[in-house]
Amino acid sequence: MLSLPQHALSLIIILLTAGGLIYFTVRLIRRCQLRIRQLEQQVEHRTRQAEQALHTKDLFLTNMSHEIRTPMNGLLGMASLLAQTSLNKEQTGYVDNIRACGDTLLTVINNILDFTALETGKITLDEKVADLRTLLDEVMEQFTARAAKAGIVLQLDMSNDVPCRVIIDLGRLRQILINLIGNAVKFTQQGQVTIRVSRADQRRLATKGEQIGLAFEVADTGAGIDAGHLEQLRVFFSRTDPASRPIGSTGLGLILSDRLVHLLHGRISVSSTPGAGSQFSFTVLAKPAPQKAVPSTAETLPRLAEKYPLRILLAEDNPINRQLAVLILDKMGYSCGVAENGKEVLDQMQKEPFDLIFMDIQMPEMDGLEATRRIRRGRGKQPVIIAMTANTTRQDRDDCITEGMNDFLSKPVHLDELIRMMETWGQTINGARQLAAS
């Protein structure tokens, strides 16, 4: 029998052991690699599912927004026209209530849509020149009837050192004010709600360049907030990471206001005394703009046709909204053409030239975007095209401008916004006429 030296036997044992270890290690590595691939596939599958779910949710919200805003445009627009007719005191109260309820519903819709957009990071700032005094007057007017009915006094205190005209996202600032003032009016049974506006302490703000800080306070004499809820709100407003904030008992309006304030590079805080009222304060950053007068909007619609004689075409498939727009333009002195879809727009343009087209987006046979594309591919004089649509996201606005539209009005259309739009483009069209004639 062959005998091996002790050292040779030891070497063989070591090699066999090492080989086994290598074999099992390789098998383990391969099994780990297979498991990793399986996990990667699962993650990829679940990511696709999450993206599809998010897309479905966005599509649902967009469609619901359009379906709700379209009748809301007719309701609020007709209420605004009705308010300009001869009404007795009782009828005026009914109309005011219709408008107030409609505005409240619209605020809820906007809050839901914007909260979803904030969660997905799809909200960006739309900064432009804004008149602060006009904004505050418009927001205050929105709550005047409701406050009067409850016996509450609404007050505005704006410091003299606050510039009237600034560059800021006017829509976002309006939302914050509406949410906070709406809450103050809702929870105040007697006394007053005061809105104060002043220059913020620059030393406490991270301003850059010409930026200035604006400080807003909404104070009420309501029931106040108990210590437990007040502490929750303070913790909520003091956290720097929006994703980590508890929703708890804070309403959607406050959550949205807090995140919009942060979007405007500011902070929000709250103080309250049970039985004596609450104060919600926030700061935002803005840039000063040239100070000049902004055309005011009276209750009576101005006869703009005398100042800006325009040939106008209205493209709108909803009969109530079509009637509403025709009535408003008629009160401005315009006799406009009408079309129920994009195909009719093109047919009308073959018959006569138009200076300005109000274009709905979602229409049968041919939508507003396709009609705009065909108009822009045509030769000859090009009309100003303004989107007038219930599709209100920033992407909708960008799509309209990309396809060749000049401007964008979201439904429900506010009369003051329509007047400003007509003034702006009326001046532009008149200027182009004068230039062509010279």
Image: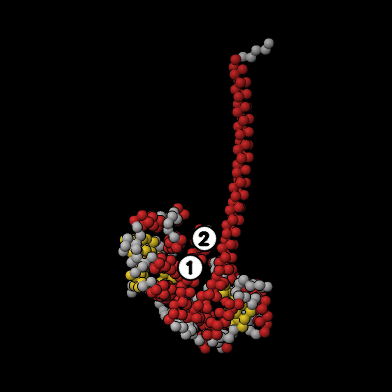
The disc labelled 2 sits on which kind of residue? Answer: Thr
Q: Nearer the viewer, residue 237 or 105?
A: 105
Q: Position of residue 193 (x, y in %)?
A: 35, 69
Residue name at image x 46 percent, y 61 percent: 252
Residue 53 vs 403, above or below: the answer is: above
Residue drawn at the location 65% of the way across and 81% of the way down:
349
| Front-lying residue, 289 or 420 | 420
Asked whether, in this view, residue 303 is left or right of residue 177, the answer is right
Give the distance between the C-alpha atoms of the residues marked 2 and 1, in whole angstroms: 14 Å
Q: Closer to us: mark 2 or mark 1?
A: 1
Please report contact status of discs 2 and 1: CB closer than 8 Å, yes or no.
no
What label does residue 116 carry, if any? Answer: 2
What's the amino acid at mark 1?
Thr
Expressed as whole percent of the image width and height from the top left, the position of residue 244 reads 45, 53
Q: Evaluate whether residue 174 shows in this view.
A: yes
Residue 398 shows in the view: no
* Label 1: how many Cα within 10 Å (few below 14, some 14–19, many 20+): some
Lower position in the chain sequence, tag 2 or tag 1: 1
Q: Please give the name of the residue rendered at 50% of the width and 78% of the height, measured from the top-left corner.
A: 79
Say the numbered circle drawn on residue 107.
1
Locate residue 249: give its quadrant: bottom left
Side of 420 relative to 163 (left or right): right
Work out which residue is located at the far front of the displayed protein and give it: 90
Q: Quadrant of the N terminus?
A: top right
